[in-house]
Image (spheres, grey):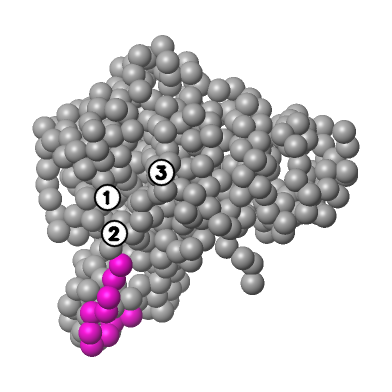
Amino acid sequence: MHAVDLIRKKRDGEELSAEEIRYLANGAAHGSIPKEQLAAWLMAAFLRGLSLAEVDALTTAMRFSGETFDPSPLGKFAVDKHSTGGVGDKTSLLVAPIAAAAGLVVPMISGRALGHTGGTLDKLESIPGYRTQLSLSEMEQVLAKAGASIVGQTQALVPADRVLYALRDCTSTVESPFLICASIMSKKLAAGLNGLVLDVKTGSGAFLHNKTDALFLAALMVETGERAGTRTAALLTNMDQPLGRFAGNWVEVWESLEVMEGNRHPLSEDLRELSLILAGWMIYLGGLVPSAEEGRHRAEEVLRSGAALQAFTSMVQAHGGDMAALAHPEQFHQPKARKDFLADRSGYLAYMDCTAVGWAVQRLGAGRERAGEPVAPHAGMEMHAKLGSQVKAGEPILTMFLNDPARFAEPEVLLRKAIVIADVPGEHPPLVQEIITAENRKKFLQAPKRP
């Protein structure tokens, strides 16, 4: 078997066998296939697309290219949630402890901020001492104690994806739904999950702005999960504005703590509701309730009882986090500079380019443009209005936080272009726009045509 033959085969629109795809994945993991040949195959796959069988084969090959986690000794249904990325999206910090407190086990392998989207690991690392790099045996110990463990990908976990992901980033082949699906699902399935809930974003702040593209990706991931024997559901959710009240790192931990403590802020209600819906699906897939609606009710009971907060603090403590920071989150928030972003006219907050808002958060220091760049734990922003809110000229729409006052200028320029105030509020889509399950996934599995 030769890589150049597989490149030619995919270039010409032919379907590769599972054995051929396994050869490519193993070559990526072990360095036996040169990167220029892997890059050429990725471009061929990007342009020609992959069949469902090829996506399944690539996902499986990458999943088993390194270590895998086996949660079965814990004796509970293993479930996780994955989001395709957004601004202010801290639902992982809520759904993991809710599901754990409901009686499930949540081995959650998360990522870091990149581009305009935030990263769960960076948020948790704003808690002093919190360790995101655990061995699989250490993660199992945390799960036995707390029921949830949110960690980063280890060097030995899905090594083929690490190589191919880096090549996709530098060869402009990131946007392929087939390659996105295989990348996401290989990492999730390597955790030995029994169930998986996917939060696929659409709208101005989503990676996939087009709803048709987002629906196809969601259905593709549900199909791949079900083929692997993992109960899978996907929710298509709105990302036309930051989720909740804060966007950043520590400020998102703070907001999540407030939700778990029962302090209901009107600007956090969308975050609370989406977290309950997602956790409800996790509880339903875990077989604890007969429907997702009843799962949402169970999730709310767990949240109101304080059990989710207890599970979260237990997880943080097991990961080495400083509990003093959690005890007084508002006092721990110590940015060196703050500045209000003021409305330039009166009217209604009618539109937001949420991707640009995400880049503003990144420029404040809370995110990164390239992998490996440091982030500022206390940088970010607090929203004072949501889409549809009435605002007055000269009043703050949001407050920015950062460590270097000289860095305010660029975020302000981005925000001024991104935020539209109009005479009428405008129409805004619902928080959850579609639900894709094993039963209806075939309806959305027609790949969108390229222009």
Residue 142 seen anywhere in this rendered image of the structure: yes
Residue 208 horizontal/vertical position (percent):
50, 61
Find the distance from the CA under tag 3 to the CA under tag 2: 22 Å
Q: Which residue lies under the disc numbered 1? A: 274
- Membership of 421 in magenta stretch: yes
Q: Which of 24/316 is in front?
A: 24
Rendering quarter of residue 6: top right
In the depicted structure, whether residue 396 falls above or below residue 298: below
Is residue 231 a member of the stretch shown in magenta? no
Dividing the picture into quadrants, the one containing residue 61 is top right
Q: Image point 16% across, 39% down: which residue?
A: 297
Toward the top, the furthest residue is: 73
Report the residue marked by disc 3. Answer: 439
Q: Element at badge 1?
A: helix
Q: Which residue is mark 2?
A: 431
Magenta span covers which residues?
A: 420-429
The three-letter amino acid code for the residue at tag 2 is Leu
Quadrant including the N terminus? top right
Identify which residue, 32 or 214, lies in the foreground: 214
Sequence-wise, the earlier of marks 3 and 2 is 2
Secondary structure character of the magenta stretch overall: loop
Q: Nearer the viewer, residue 187 or 375?
A: 187
For the residue carrying disc 1, how many other residues have a C-alpha within 10 Å: few (<14), some (14-19), or many (20+)? many
Position of 264 compared to 282: left or right? left
Closer to the N terminus: mark 1 or mark 3?
A: 1
Q: Could you tell me the amino acid type at mark 1?
A: Leu
Whole-number angstrom distance, CA of label 1 to CA of label 3: 22 Å
How many dots with numbers?
Answer: 3
Tell me the amino acid under the disc marked 3: Glu
Check disc 2 and report its element: helix, strand or loop.
Answer: loop
Label 3 SS: loop
Is disc 3 surrounded by few (<14), some (14 to 19) or many (20+) residues within 10 Å? few
